Amino acid sequence: MPEYLPSPSNLLSATIRRGHPGFLDLPWGVPLDEWKNCCPRVEELPRGLSRHPVLFVSYDDALYALKELPDGLAVREYDVLRELEERRLPSVRPVGHARVRQNDLVVSLLITQYLDHAMPYHALFMRSSLVRYRDHLLDAMAVLLVQLHLAGVFWGDCSLSNTLFRRDAGRLNAYFVDGETSEVRDEISDGMRRSDLDIMLENVYGGLLDLDAMGSLPARFPVDDIGPYIRSKYEALWHQVTREEVVRADEQFRIEERVRALNDLGFSVDQIDLFAAETGDRLRLRAQVADRHFHRDTLHSLTGLDPEEMQARQMLNEINERRAILSAHENRSIPLSSAAHNWLRETYLPTVQKLLDGLPKSVDPAEIYCQLLEHKWYLSERAGHDVGLAAAIADFVRGDLRHVREA
Ligand SMILES: Nc1ncnc2c1ncn2[C@@H]1O[C@H](COP(=O)(O)OP(=O)(O)O)[C@@H](O)[C@H]1O
Ligand SMILES: [Mg+2]
């Protein structure tokens, strides 16, 4: 690799958030496309298609994505990503932005934190071991659009390439990557939502045609149906979350039911609005959701773990079971926090340590744990009784973990 000289004099200005390196040793005066020949920090990792040069650099254990944009655009995208972070939306985390001189040209660079344990969509389409995730991928895109729209974000460029996917208890969560065209408001209109869906339809269709041209789609893959499928999932979920219900004044339980149904989907309910309905003693009920962190927040406050939403839901089920068992055993009511600590210490941490032994660092511990739970459930179903954790771990390590290594 040729020597390069760090060129801070080409760095006109930069803003870097606390807790990250200063990035001063990067070859700022060189176009990003040429960095792989001159910068030892560059890491080759799979990524989606992009309009602009994008690459990854590593500093010790931390990985960052850099994107080169025309002057002025990086700060704009950085601001959008900060707004998304504030609204607790699933997106890549902004780290900083810079203006640099490259010969006679001034360009801007956006720095984001590399999203761990995530995959670009084409990995999900191309690897046969991941085929079972395809439907989940479409559902995940619909959920992401609903989350953005609920929070007042117009994406403007929803596409497969602008989304990253993380596994979540056998399903997927979609993460927002590219905010170049986005607008963040208090609330967005139905017209803007429709426009985002139209853009999604066009982009998804285009993305699938690209995959088809690369020979990455199975024969007779229904390219035309995919965008409309995402839209119908979006519309169903949007309706579920935002619909108004009419309840009788004495139907307090209907409010609780509504909140529970939203929590089950992961949405935290911020407030319930009630309005007098036109007819008699009826009320119109509307729920305002805050974010999709319901189980994550609960699990985090109990254990300090911060997995994906549905992973957290499964773990909380385990903690509740543990509480019931401990309470029965000790013949008294055990607080949930004690059960959570017992589960973390006796079960989760030692199990994850065993499972991760010899696996690459890119493997998400929480997802491996959830896969083990599913495996244990499957073995127990087949055996007609609970096979126990130790037997499930032994069988899982012998069998399924091989697939995990491949994936
Ligand atoms: N923070 C990140 N973590 C992981 N991958 C990323 C990150 N930022 C970008 N990528 C990858 O780079 C690709 C291109 O990034 P994107 O912001 O969409 O660029 P463009 O604006 O040129 O389309 C994405 O599809 C994604 O795969
Ligand atoms: Mg993009």
Image (cartoon, rainbow, N blue to C red):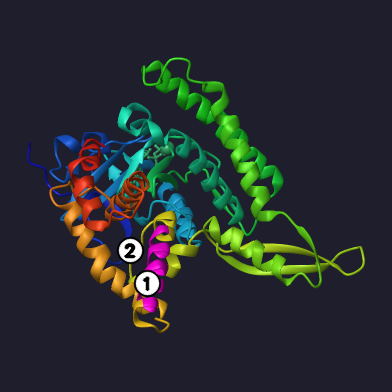
Q: Please indicate whether residue 242 sits to the left or right of residue 205 in the image.
A: right
- Is residue 127 among what the camera can see? no
Nearest the eye: 267 or 33: 267
Q: Which residue is mark 1?
A: 325
Q: Quadrant of the C terminus?
A: top left
Q: Which callout, 2 or 1, points at the residue further toward the start of the chain?
A: 2
Q: In the structure shown, which secondary structural element does the residue marked by tag 1 occupy? A: helix
Q: Is residue 145 above or below residue 19?
A: above
Nearest the eye: 103 or 97: 97
- Residue type, mark 1 in image: Ile
- Residue type, mark 2 in image: Arg
Q: Residue furthest bottom?
A: 332
- Is residue 370 among what the camera can see? yes
Where on the picture, by quarter, is residue 339? bottom left
Q: Which residue is mark 2?
A: 17
How far apart, in angstroms, are the residues tagged by discs 2 and 1? 46 Å
Q: Please indicate whether residue 120 sits to the left or right of residue 234 in the image.
A: left
Q: Which residues are magenta?
A: 314-328
Q: Residue furthest front?
A: 384
Q: Quadrant of ligand 1?
A: top left
Which is the main secondary structure of the residues drawn in magenta? helix
Nearest the eye: 362 or 387: 387
Q: Please indicate whether residue 33 sits to the left or right of residue 193 in the image.
A: left
Residue under the image location 26 percent in, 57 percent down: 389
